[in-house]
Amino acid sequence: MKLKTVVVTGSNGLLGQKVVNLLAQRPAIELIATGLGYNRNPETKGYTYHSVDVTNSLALRKIFETYKPTEVIHTAAMTNVDACEKDPITCQKVNVEAVANLCELCKEFQTKLIHVSTDFIFDGKEGLYTEEAEPNPLSVYGKAKYEAEKIIISSSISYAIARTILLYGVAPNLSRTNIVLWIIQSLQAGKAIQVVSDQYRSPTLAEDLADGLVAILLKEKTGIYHLSGPEVMSILEIAYTVADYFELDKSLITPTTTAALGQPALRPPRTGFILLKANLELGYNPHSLRNGLAIVKQQLEDL
């Protein structure tokens, strides 16, 4: 007997694929994966895939009417921070309006929403952040993600919000890269890269975040959880660590500053989360960057 019917949005993305892989073989779960276009994770069995644009309210409603999910794990988002800055209309549509629509459907169908949010809701002046810290987003992206959180919290649905930081990892047929893959691919190609030395983050292995989301699901937790990697380091330090681990040429890495790089969107200078709540309530115990890179290395070899 199926005890839960779970819809995963954004299932073609890095995080979505990891969540699907974790849930697909659980006999008590009927799993429905949704993403844009074709299924990029066809090797995993044990779930149903539908091509669904989360901004298409009619398509989403059809999924709810067909499967009547007990939970939705919402990983779909527009996460390119500079693209959001340049195209705030699409950012609002994907990161806010789709969430508002999901909340309405979850209310109607008595579905719990497990939503993925970001450290970019904070201004980066006073990290490390607890779940209770006051958000103050700097960018179009951060403001949209914070607005989505407020919509969820003010709704009458059952929800959990999982905030994360600088996700990295490997999955088949990804449509976009991430910090670790960008560094590896650039240095392997002999391409010089500029990396900021004055922004500090906690690199988060995709498997760890997926584990946290599944723990929220299975333990039936509600509220806000911070799920990130355990270390705070500069982006430059991350780049040097990746280069060292993969024995790549560090001389191709040029340190720069946020001001000199001139990215379109403002970034919080230093984030990082206090993970105590997630550790105590979810058993969340994320990998260090070096241990995460060992997993990435093996996965790259297996591709």
Image (cartoon, grey):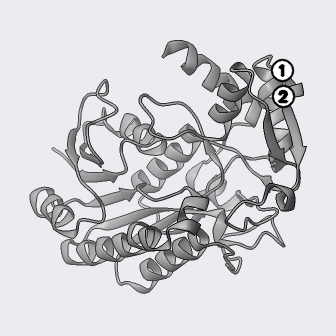
Residue 176, how many percent across, how many down? 50, 41
Count of marks overlaid on the render? 2
Viewed as shown, does residue 247 lie left or right of 19? right
The residue that label 1 is drawn on is 249
Q: Could you say which is closer to the camera, residue 158 or residue 93?
A: 93
Viewed as shown, does residue 215 lie left or right of 12? right
The residue that label 2 is drawn on is 252
Viewed as shown, does residue 12 lie left or right of 57? right
> Furthest-left residue in view?
66
Q: Could you say which is closer to the camera, residue 97 or residue 21?
A: 97
SS class, disc 2: helix
Q: Are marks 1 and 2 in contact (CB under 8 Å)?
A: yes
> What amino acid is labelled 2 in the image?
Leu
- Answer above or below: position of 129 versus 254: below
| Residue 251 seen | yes
Going 32% across and 59% down the picture, which residue do you hit?
72
- Answer above or below: position of 92 versus 75: below
Find residue 31 and report its image quarter: top left
| Residue 158 seen | no
> Furthest-top residue in view?
301
Viewed as shown, does residue 291 lie left or right of 27? right
